Image (cartoon, helix red, strand yellow):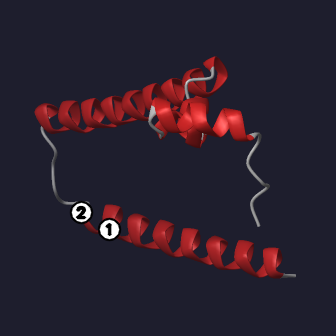
Amino acid sequence: MRTLILLGALGLLLLGALFVALRSWTGLAGVAIPWQGWLALIGGAVLTLALGIGLMALMFYSARRGHDEAAHDQQAFRLPEARERDEEDGPPPPPR
C-alpha cells in the first residue's frame, strides 16, 4: 500500500512537471531561437547525458572489479599494529 501511494505521488509530480514544461514551451511560441541557441541546447543535453552515462559506467566498473570492497572493509583503515593484534585475538564479535 505504501508503495502504491509513493508511486502515485511520484506520478503526480511527473505530471505536474510535464504540465509546467508544456505550458512554458507553448508560452514562448513567439520567441525565435537562433541556430546557436539550438546548438547550445543540443550540446548541453548531449554532454549532460554523456557525463551521466560515463559516471554510471565507472560506478558499475568499480563495483564489478571489487574496488568498493576496500571501502567496506573496516580493517583497511586500522594501523598495521592494531590489525596484527586483532588477528592474534581472533575474529571480532558480530555487530549488534
* Vertical comparison of 83 with 15: above or below: above
- The spot of residue 49 in percent (x, y) is 41, 33
- The spot of residue 30 in percent (x, y) is 19, 60
Amino acid type assigned to the residue bearing label 2 in the image: Leu
Observer-nearest of 45 and 4: 4
Q: Do labels 2 and 1 touch, CB within 8 Å? A: yes
Amino acid type assigned to the residue bearing label 1 in the image: Ser
Residue at x 73% of width, y 72% of height: 7
Q: Residues within 10 Å of mark 2 (few under 14, many from 20)?
A: few
Q: Which residue is mark 1?
A: 24
Q: CA distance from mark 2 to mark 1?
A: 7 Å
Residue at x 53% of width, y 30% of height: 59
Q: Which residue is mark 2?
A: 28
Residue at x 63% of width, y 22% of height: 66
Relative to 33, 73 lies left or right: right
Q: Quadrant of the N terminus?
A: bottom right
* Vertical comparison of 1 with 37: above or below: below
Q: Mark 2, mark 1: which one is toward the viewer?
A: 1
- The spot of residue 41 in percent (x, y) is 25, 39
SS class of the residue under badge 2?
loop
Residue at x 42% of width, y 65% of height: 22
